[in-house]
């Protein structure tokens, strides 16, 4: 069985379907989705329906992203959030106009069931954004940190490349886990379009919401599969650019 981590999709369903095919995903694989399934391209509700269906035939773990929580709040509570609207929410709202109430309730159930983090039997941590507690995720005071934090990725990018895990100055919160897999902050911000490793952290968000591809990584072998740049599937849309 392979353990495959999938980066932020941002409603890029067509790219997701392509990269799952490229990776030759089977029902024997464990698929760990790192969150942000919506907000970006026009296939928001279609992406969620696809993931719900995929979960009936495959072994899937779905992590909660900040955009997923924003969408849930809008669907369930009718919250008006102008900032969300400007950062992909408009396309998501337009997508949901096509759905009947029964399907919307099914989607709300999906968003509500998302996990804040997943820890596997090899002590590898999977979450959307980060955590701050020195003792690890179980001791985190503010749960929103799991899907909003950017300091973890910013911190590891600042590490001296020679700083090893046995160094006394290596960040103690990272030592709780053998590896950490995140999304949330696109690596396109540092000029990259492939999953990036810093310290014992892997960032799999390769900028699908913008000009980058959607990525899958085999967490054991570090083999990577990527879609075409997601915007090429939606040539008449602006995405979050």
Image (tube, rainbow, N blue to C red):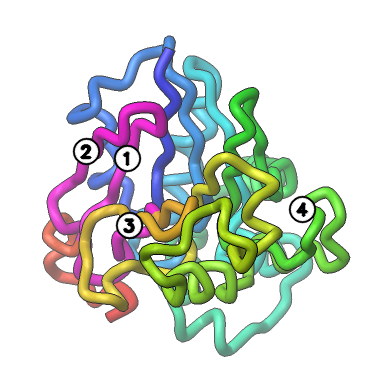
Of the two numbered discs 3 and 1 in the rendering, the one whose residue sits closer to the viewer: 3
Please identify the quarter of the rendering in which residue 110 is found. Answer: top right
Tell me which label, 3 or 2, sits earlier in the chain.
Answer: 3
- Quick check: 216 above or below 86? above
**Label 2: few (<14), some or many (≥20) within 10 Å?**
many
Tell me which label, 3 or 1, sits earlier in the chain.
Answer: 3
Of the two numbered discs 4 and 1 in the rendering, the one whose residue sits closer to the viewer: 4
Of the two numbered discs 3 and 2 in the rendering, the one whose residue sits closer to the viewer: 3
Residue at 34% x, 61% y is 42
Residue 101 visible? no
Tell me which label, 4 or 3, sits earlier in the chain.
Answer: 4
Determine the CA span between mark 3 and mark 1. 12 Å
Nearest the viewer among 124 and 231 is 124
Determine the CA span between mark 4 and mark 1. 25 Å
**Boundaries of the magenta span:** 204-230
Prevailing secondary structure of the magenta residues? loop
Q: Which residue is mark 3?
A: 196
Q: Position of residue 146 (x, y in %)?
A: 68, 60
Q: How many marks?
A: 4
Tell me which label, 4 or 1, sits earlier in the chain.
Answer: 4
Of the two numbered discs 4 and 2 in the rendering, the one whose residue sits closer to the viewer: 4
Numbered tag placed on residue 216 in the rendering:
1
Q: Position of residue 71 (x, y in %)?
A: 61, 64
Nearest the viewer among 10 and 48 is 10
Tell me which label, 4 or 2, sits earlier in the chain.
Answer: 4
Residue at 54% x, 27% y is 60
**Label 1: few (<14), some or many (≥20) within 10 Å?**
many
Tell me which label, 1 or 2, sits earlier in the chain.
Answer: 1
Q: Position of residue 85 (x, y in %)?
A: 51, 81
């Amino acid at each position: 069985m392979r353990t495959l981590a999938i980066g932020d999709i941002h409603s890029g369903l067509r790219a997701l379907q392509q990269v799952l095919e490229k990776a030759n995903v089977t029902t024997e694989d464990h698929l760990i989705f790192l969150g942000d399934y919506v907000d970006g391209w026009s296939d928001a509700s279609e992406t969620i329906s696809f993931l719900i269906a995929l979960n009936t035939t495959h072994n899937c773990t779905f992590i909660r992203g900040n955009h997923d929580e924003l969408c849930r709040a809008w669907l369930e509570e009718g919250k008006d959030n102008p900032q969300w609207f400007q950062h992909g929410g408009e396309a998501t709202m337009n997508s949901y106009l096509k759905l009947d109430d029964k399907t919307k309730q099914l989607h709300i159930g999906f968003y509500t069931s998302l996990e804040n983090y997943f820890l596997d039997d090899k002590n590898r941590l999977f979450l959307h954004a980060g955590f701050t507690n020195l003792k690890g995720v179980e001791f985190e005071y503010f749960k929103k940190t799991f899907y909003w934090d950017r300091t973890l990725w910013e911190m590891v990018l600042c590490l001296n490349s020679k700083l090893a895990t046995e160094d006394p100055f290596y960040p103690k919160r990272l030592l709780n886990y053998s590896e950490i897999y995140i999304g949330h902050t696109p690596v396109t911000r540092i000029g990259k379009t492939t999953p990036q490793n810093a310290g014992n952290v892997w960032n799999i968000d390769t900028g699908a919401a913008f000009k980058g591809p959607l990525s899958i990584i085999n967490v054991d072998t570090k083999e990577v599969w990527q879609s075409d740049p997601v915007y090429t599937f939606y040539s008449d849309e602006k995405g979050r650019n």
